[in-house]
Amino acid sequence: MTIEQKNDGALTSKESFRAIGFKWEGTFAEAGEGGIRKIQMELINRLNEIPRIVNPDILLGLSYHATLGGNGFTHYAAVEVDNVDEIPSGMVSIAVPTLTYATCEHRKGQNIKRSYDNVYEWILKEGLKENNVDHLTHFEKYPMTQDPYSTDPEFTIMIPVKR
C-alpha cells in the first residue's frame, strides 16, 4: 500500500538579492552522483569566509537552464548577502531579480520527484506559467545544518512563476 504524498503549493514573492557561493556545471547524471553535494559541503566548510551573510542558517541551491545540449545545467550553492564587497577565492557572486515563486515544502520521508511533480501540478491548476527570468528554473532552500549527503533531505522548493 502506498501512502499518497501531498505537498501544498503557495505563492511567495522575494525581492531581488545577491548571493555568494560556488558554481557547478554538469550533467544531470553527474548531479545525481553527488556533484552538487560537493560544492554544498565546500560552502558549509568555508561559510566563515563570506562577509555580510543575511541568513547563515539557509543554504541556497539555484539551478539554471539546461546546458550541454540539454543534458546538463548550472547550479550555485550559495548564501544570500546584503552586499558584495569582496568575493572569497574560488567563489562567485550571483544576482537574482525580484520574482514570484510557487513554493512547497519537501519533508523528510517524501519522494523528491513527487514533491516536484506536486508543485508543477499546482502551478498548472492555479493557471500560472513558469517564469525563467535569466534562465533561473528553480531554487531550493536547505537548512545549513543538514548534511548535503543525506539521502532523506528536507528543503523548500521555489519555482519562478507568472500569471
Image (cartoon, rainbow, N blue to C red):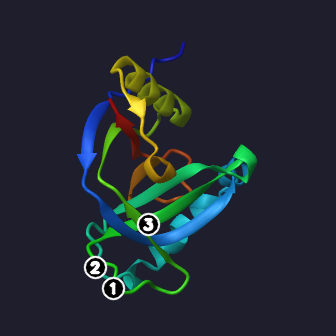
User: What x and y, as percent, mark residue 156?
Assistant: 37, 45
Which residue corresponds to mark 1? 85
- Depth check: 114 or 103 in front? 103
Q: Quadrant of residue 100?
A: top left
**112 horizontally vs 26: left or right:** left
Mark 3 or mark 1, earlier in chain: 3
Q: Residue at x 31, y 63 (%)?
A: 17
Mark 1 neighbour density, 10 Å: few (under 14) some (14–19) many (20 or more): few
Q: Nearer the viewer, mark 3 or mark 1?
A: 1
* Observer-nearest of 124 and 139: 124
Q: Which mark is residue 52?
A: 2
Can residue 105 be seen in this snapshot? no
Name the element at disc 3: strand
Query: Which quadrant, please, contains the C terminus?
Result: top left
- Nearer the camera: disc 2 or disc 1: 1
The amino acid type of the residue labelled 1 equals: Asp
Q: Residue at x 54, y 73 (%)?
A: 42
**At x 38% / y 82%, what residue is drawn?**
48
Secondary structure beneath dot 1 equals: loop
Q: Is residue 117 above or below residue 134?
A: above
Q: Which residue is mark 3?
A: 78
Separation (CA) of disc 2 from disc 1 = 9 Å
Determine contact: label 2, label 1, CB under 8 Å.
yes
Type of amino acid under label 2: Arg
Question: Dot 3: within a 10 Å radius of its alpha carbon, few (fewer than 14), some, or many (20 or more) residues?
Answer: many
Q: Is residue 158 left or right of residue 34?
A: left
